[in-house]
Image (cartoon, grey):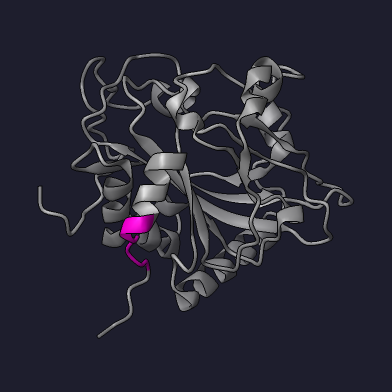
Amino acid sequence: MEKAAVRSVTTSEVEHFSEHGWVHLPSLVDSDTVEGLHRVADDRLSATKSEVGRGVGYVDRAFGQDRDIAAIEPDFRAVAHDKNMGDNAIRLLGSVHRVRLQISNLLVKEPVGSMLHSEETVFHQDFPWLPMDRSSMLTVWVALVPVTADMGSLRFVDRSHRLGVLGRSFVRDGDDMLSQHPWLQQHSIAGGVDLQPGDATVHHALTVHGAPANSTERRRLSFAATYFGADTLYTGAPYSQTDQLDPPLTVGSPFESPRFPLIDTRIEE
C-alpha cells in the first residue's frame, strides 16, 4: 500500500487541540513528500533571490511570504488538498462537515544577521482581519527544514481560543496582543518546540500566537495552509483576498469561489 503523504490526527491530538487551541503534530507530512516541497521552495527562493514577500508592512517585517503557493506549485497543492488534511481539519475543528482552503503560503523567517533579516512575529489572532461571520478556522504550519525554538517556532497563549475576538495586531508599533491585553500574561505560553521536517503545529484562528526573531544563522522555512468551515458566510468587510474577486462574493452567502476551493475528504457527511 502506498504511504500517505499526510497522516491522520489521533484522538488525543484532537482532544489537545480542543482544550488548548493548538497542537503539535510530529511527522504530519511524509519525509519524501516534505523533501520535495523543500526542493521546490529552494528553487523558488533562488529564482527570486530570497526576496519573497518583502514589503514595508508590519507583517512583512516578521517573515517573507510566497503567497498562494498551492495554486502555483503542484507539489504544494497536493499536500494542501490531501484528503487526510481535509479530514484532519474537520476533526480538529469539530463543528464543521466540509472545509475550504483559505490560503497557502511558503513562509520564510530570515536570520537576524542577514540583509533580509526578519523581526519577531508579534502575538496576534488570525481571525480579526477576515470578512467571515464565524471563526471555525485553523492553520496547519509545517516545518520544511529542522526548526529549533531559537529559529522562531510558534508560541501560543494556551487556551486563548476560548477568549473571543481580541482585536487586530500588525497595525502600529507596540500593538502586540500581550501589550494590548496585559491580563493575557496570566495564561501560560506554550509551544516553542523543536520541529523536524514534516512536523507541524496547528492553531485555531482565535488562538493568540507569535514567534521570536530567528537568532540562528539558518533560514526558517515552513509551509502554512489555512482551512475554514464551508458553511462560513461572507460579511463584505474589506479584505485584499476578496475585494477584487471576479465574479464577486455575495454578502451573506458562502465563499463559493475557485479562490476558496472545497477540500475533498474521506469523512462522509
The x and y percentages for residue 207 are: 50, 33
Q: Quadrant of residue 156?
A: top right
Q: Main secondary structure of the magenta part?
A: loop
The answer to whether 192 is drawn above or below residue 233 in the figure is below
The x and y percentages for residue 29 are: 44, 67
The x and y percentages for residue 150 are: 77, 54
At x 26%, y 22%, the residue is 233
Q: Quadrant of residue 232?
A: top left
At x 39%, y 20%, the residue is 131
Residue 9 in magenta? yes
Residue sticking out furthest to the right: 113
Residue 194 in magenta? no
- Is 215 left, or right, of 11 in this rendering? right
Is residue 19 or residue 55 the one in the foreground? 19
Is residue 66 or residue 227 the one in the foreground? 227
Residue sticking out furthest to the bottom: 1
The answer to whether 81 is drawn above or below residue 176 in the figure is below
At x 74%, y 58%, the residue is 219
Q: Quadrant of residue 139?
A: top left
**Is residue 206 in view?**
no
- Is 265 left, or right, of 180 in this rendering? left
Which quarter of the rendering shows the N terminus? Answer: bottom left
Range covered by the magenta-colored residues:
6-12
Q: Please state the total of marks drawn on the protein image.
A: 0
Residue sticking out furthest to the front: 186
The x and y percentages for residue 54 are: 70, 40
- Is 31 left, or right, of 51 in this rendering? left
**Is residue 250 in view?**
yes
